Amino acid sequence: MPAAQNTHGASLELRPPPSALRPDFRATRPAACPTRTPGTMCFDDRVKLNVDVTGHGHRTAVLLHGMMGSAESWWRVAPLLVDNGYRVLAVDLPGHGLSPRDGTMTHLRAAEWIAETIAEECGTTPDIAVGHSYGGLILAAAVHAKVLSPRLAIYVDAPFTSRGGWDRDELLAAYESDRRARTYEGLRASRPHYSDQDCVVEARAAKRFDPATATAPATGPGATYPPEPGSIVVRADPSSYVDDATAAELRARGVIVRSIPGAAHSIWYSNFDEFVEALPEVFAPQNPESVID
């Protein structure tokens, strides 16, 4: 999908200095394919994405960034999760950050790569999985395909449908143009709600972004991956991905929808406190008896 702009100047498709990260935030952990037993999924290709692991809590949180972002997009969220007792796995999606590229990528292949990558750390049932924008679409695809089964899935201003059928050359050109514009200076000018470090992190992510990997799924068939009942959707209000009609449909399906008025597409960049307050299941201090189960 090509990028669009909302009223905050933030790209609706694209989300996406190390000194502010915790010392172990960039530690990359390998994942191994689980032993194949009856009823157990095993991924034969054994592709490993880059995953930043931090924390030693008894609960596990998987974070999936948006288009043209990276694991570092969660630089402010991950430490808060660690402080609240989570072991955090922030994944670089295919074609992003330090992860492998693949010009024939599909949504389901991306979902499988994510599941394989985190398997050694937490199996395929993390306590929570959070997906923003494109990362939310991939999370929904992973849950739909049953390669991931988080105890709680959280979607941050994410689409659940990919229309497919985009022209490859046109979309490649759009992504490349957007990538080149996402310099530190460009982000400071176009996204006044970004902090200095937000600009540093997202400019670095843009340099590492591979347009061919991102383009491939959008040129294939369209698909819809509706979130499961009990999932949580946190949306900007207004939102170009989860408008009022979509929010009503999701609520009718048993999905919990929470809105943050005036927020940008990357909600935690523009409205960090409101984002945290919208997810008490995740960020509120918990005692051992209140762990998600």
Image: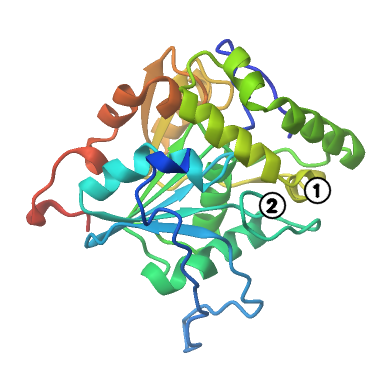
Q: Which residue is mark 2?
A: 95
Q: Is residue 15 visible?
A: no
State whether residue 74 is above or below residue 260.
below
- Three-letter code for the amino acid on which mark 1 is drawn: Ala
In screen coordinates, is 228 left or right of 226? left
Q: Are marks 1 and 2 in contact (CB under 8 Å)?
A: yes
Q: Amino acid at mark 2?
A: Gly
Q: Is residue 88 above or below residue 240?
A: below
Q: Quadrant of the C terminus?
A: bottom left
Residue 281 appears in the picture as rendered: yes
Q: Residue at x 58, y 10 (%)?
A: 7
Callout 1: helix, strand or loop? helix
Judged left or right of residue 167, residue 271 is left
The residue positioned farthest toward the right in the image shown = 169
Along the line of sight, which residue is nearer the eye, 53 or 239?
53
Mark on residue 212?
A: 1
Q: Position of residue 146 (x, y in %)?
A: 50, 64
Residue at the image position 63 percent from the left and 58 percent from the top: 99
* Residue placed most toward the observer, 158 or 212: 212
Measured Cα–Cα span from mark 1 to mark 2: 8 Å
Instruction: Assess disc 2: are there few (<14), some (14-19) or many (≥20) residues with their C-alpha within 10 Å of its C-alpha.
Output: many
- The spot of residue 180 in percent (x, y) is 76, 30
Q: How many marks?
A: 2
Image coordinates of residue 16 in percent, x first then y, are 57, 35
Tell whether 111 sits left or right of 132: right
